[in-house]
Amino acid sequence: MTILVTGGAGYIGSHMVHELVDAGEPVVVLDNLSTGFRFLLPGSVPFFAGSTGDRELVTRIIAEHKVTAIIHFAASIVVPDSVRDPLSYYLNNTMNTCILLDAAVKAGVKQVIFSSTAAVYGNAETVPVREEAPTAPIAPYGTSKLMSEIMLHDAGKAYGLRFVILRFFNVAGADPRGRTGQSTPFATHLIKVACETALGKRPKLEVFGTDYPTPDGTCIRDYIHVTDLVRAHSAALAYLRRGGANATFNCGYGKGASVFEVIEAVRRACGHDFPVEIGGRRPGDPATLVADVSRIRTILDWRPQFQDLDTIVTHALAWEQRLPGKKSESAVA
């Protein structure tokens, strides 16, 4: 009954590992440590350094640890980077997922939970966006994830693979118990960057575009606390174990906050101002992305506990205060 967590030493993956260990689930982690850190993991969890594209390693992990389910986080996730270097995203996010799924199917693994993204929707025509909305990614990152979704559907039909696809909106915050959080240097997550700037680890925060068709001109996103997100994965696993049908769910709260609203929340949390610079738009950024969450709330046994922007920011700031760091030469957000 062991669960393989790919990308388990990363930001979201490490939260997932703690969640599973807390629930008494046997876990094994595969991570290439390109953006992850072993110190984020419980010491008792078996760890393998490597790629999901390493078929031999994946097959050995599944056999040695009697893996029955895979929660697949491992991916490259920076949208602008995917525009600059698309082939690396198709390699890491799509081709490696194909190898992972092929190894899993051949080893008899029947349950997969796939971490996808709201980026598959692109510039959604209707907001909040439903799972049935057209998928039209505007950056290779979203396309690479959509390709993996298609593979899962085809594998389900051909091999009987059972899966849940979770489309993340904007993940933020940190473990309320202070065990893990966003730790990647030069991360591009807005709340992470704002907290770093507030603590003097970056000289400034740059806002990418104030001319979007939104109330204050900045992008609006549906921010979900990382703890609520990993609990959605636990609910998805329980759903599959009960015999639930293959399904896709949005993971968000159904409400959005603008970039300026996030900045104000960080200012409230830290108690002081910090430098903000206005820049131009960033490639691949839609104006508004907010989830329709009626499906996940109806079908999965999932009730979020931290759906408040100030709570999300407070937990993120508390984690950032624990991390060592120094001022960088430039900042992006």
Image (cartoon, grey):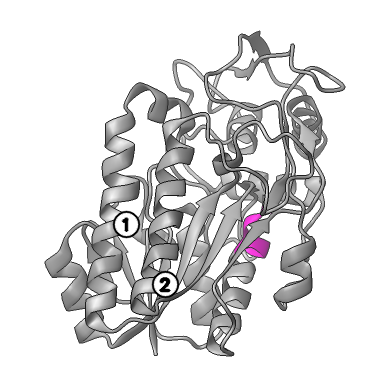
Within 10 Å of the Cα at label 1, are there few (<14), some (14-19), or many (20+) other Cα atoms?
A: many
Residue located at (12% from left, 68% from top): 56
Q: Which amino acid, by three-letter code, is at mark 2?
A: Gly
Which residue is tagged 1? 97
Q: Are marks 1 and 2 in contact (CB under 8 Å)?
A: no
Farthest right residue in view: 215
Q: Position of residue 203 (x, y in %)?
A: 56, 17
Residue stretch in magenta: 225-229
Query: On the picture, is 252 further left or further right than 330?
Result: right
The foreground one among 311 and 26 is 26
Dominant SS type (magenta): helix
Q: Position of residue 90 (x, y in %)?
A: 31, 40
Q: Which amino acid, by three-letter code, is at mark 1?
A: Thr
Farthest left residue in view: 56
Query: On the picture, is 315 further left or further right than 95?
Result: right
Which residue is tagged 2? 156
- Rounded to the nearest angstrom, the CA distance separating label 1 from label 2 is 14 Å
Picture quarter containing residue 191?
top right
The foreground one among 190 and 158 is 158
Please tell me which of labels 1 and 2 falls first in the chain.
Answer: 1
**Does the segment drawn in magenta span residue 239?**
no
Query: On the picture, is 124 further left or further right than 112?
Result: right
- Tell me if residue 84 can be seen: yes
Query: On the picture, is 87 further left or further right than 3?
Result: left
